[in-house]
Image (spheres, grey):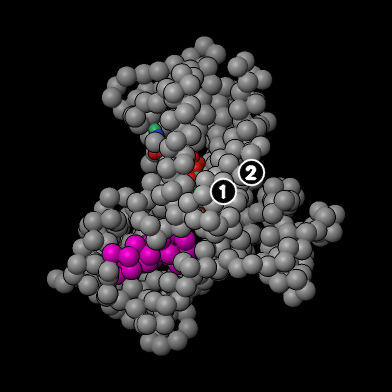
Amino acid sequence: MGRGVAYSTSEPAHLLNVRAEGMSAWAGEPDHFVKRFELESGDRRGFAQRRLFGRYLGEILDEAVASGRTERIDETATAATRIDDGWRLQLGDDSAIEASALVLAVGNQEPEVLSAFSVVGPRFIRNPWGADARAAVAELAAGGGAALLVGTGLTMVDLVLSLDAAGHQGKILALSRRGLVPRSHADFEPAPIEMAELPSGLRNLFRWLRRRSGEVGWRAAVDSLRPYSHPLWQGLGHDGQRRFLRHARPWWDVHRHRIAPEVAGTVARLVGEGRLEIVAGRIVGAREADDGLEVTFRRRRGAPASQSLTFSYAFNCTGPLHSIARTKDPLLRSLLDSGEVTPDHLGIGLEIGGTCRPGEHLWAMGPLTKGRYWEIIAVPDIREQAAAVAEDIEREIGA
Ligand SMILES: Cc1cc2nc3c(=O)[nH]c(=O)nc-3n(C[C@H](O)[C@H](O)[C@H](O)COP(=O)(O)OP(=O)(O)OC[C@H]3O[C@@H](n4cnc5c(N)ncnc54)[C@H](O)[C@@H]3O)c2cc1C
């Protein structure tokens, strides 16, 4: 508890993708995490292991429990119904709890179902963050079979690191429509700007970004937008946001959500050794074969244009679920089905009003609020949101 998908990994090769100095859990105490990291590593600007950050979050939760003001219940919330001035939450063990305020902080949802793999069996790993994925990595390392990673973003990078750390020597093929891979962090001279210097509209913003990248470097240009990411997103309007998701998102993601240089080094080494191939293309079909999973795909460029290869395992690395209406989380399902919450205008999170409120005495945080804020998935953004939500709850129902 407290660690979520991101920080419950036990793999030392999984590093944070934000420098330690940016990862304090507390909005008002920027050095809270980095002080500890510096003690252990002598470094302030490095990228800590995610499991170390998980321990840090676990300790904060332990302190909250020890204070007597927080109780932890290790159960799945399966449904929520409204009662007078609050909520009754049904739990997986058939017990229930009542609360005046309910905060939905359920994080990222399992990836989208991939139609090409809908009829294949357990050699296709639907959830790359679960126990099946860990078992498949161990089997691949022991047997040396080939692995297909569908998706070339941060989840792909995690899987590649896990396979490499486990001693896997077989071939890894990672495929996505554009074959774009997260770029590496590197030191750069910041080039801050004022919001007033930015043009309006998606096309103009991207033109500005290209020009500014030429002047100050793309990392400085991209990061100069960070303080304004929420108003910029909201300023795009619904049509602009839809166009961003359709056309610009893959480019934005790989430049904005960068990986630690040592992680980028491992990816480059594996590509150089011919053990990892990144392909731009699309999956045409998949079927069970005697010796594994036979997958046919078409390359966007290069030869052969169409190819069928057999893999011991394929992993869904397409990233968190995009369409919230398809969530399998029982709590979210119950709230969506009863109409207590509704998908936002883009269908990627929940419709919220005020300070992250999808309903009365109901708050939502993190990825569930992507439609309103877009850049609200990483700790530096979520901690500010957590502080604002806490204040709002106090205002609404008292301390
Ligand atoms: C692999 C990965 C790596 C990442 N690395 C970074 C990073 O380096 N730096 C960074 O800033 N961000 C990173 N992120 C972004 C990450 O999403 C956030 O940092 C943060 O973990 C999100 O916090 P959260 O509390 O919203 O969700 P989560 O951390 O996912 O927590 C959600 C919790 O809710 C629980 N839950 C869900 N449904 C129910 C239910 N029905 N009943 C009971 N409990 C439920 C889950 O079990 C989980 O414990 C990463 C994300 C991923 C997936």
Find residue 203 and report its image quarter.
bottom right
Task: Decide if residue 210 is in sight here.
Answer: no
Marks 2 and 1 sit apart, C-alpha to C-alpha, by 8 Å
The quarter of the picture where the C terminus appears is: top right
Picture coordinates of residue 335, whole percent (x, y): 46, 30
In the visual, does 291 lie left or right of 259? left
* Residue density around tag 2, few if under 14, some if 14–19, many if 20 or more, within 10 Å: some
Q: Position of residue 231 (x, y in %)?
A: 74, 47
User: Marks 1 and 2: in contact by CB < 8 Å?
Assistant: yes
Foreground residue among 358 and 198? 198
Question: Considering only vertical position in the picture, is 105 above or below 68?
Answer: below
Kindly indicate the quadrant of the structure image that contains residue 294: bottom left
Which numbered circle lies on residue 34? Answer: 1
Residue 358 is left or right of residue 112, and the answer is right
Magenta stretch containing residue 156, yes or no?
Answer: yes
Which residue is at the front of the view, 399 or 367? 399
Residue drawn at (47%, 73%) of the image: 265
Q: SS of the residue at dot 2? A: loop
- Quarter holding the N terminus? top left
Residue type for callout 1: Val
Q: Which residue extends farthest bottom? A: 303
Which mark, residue 30?
2
Q: Which residues are magenta?
A: 146-166
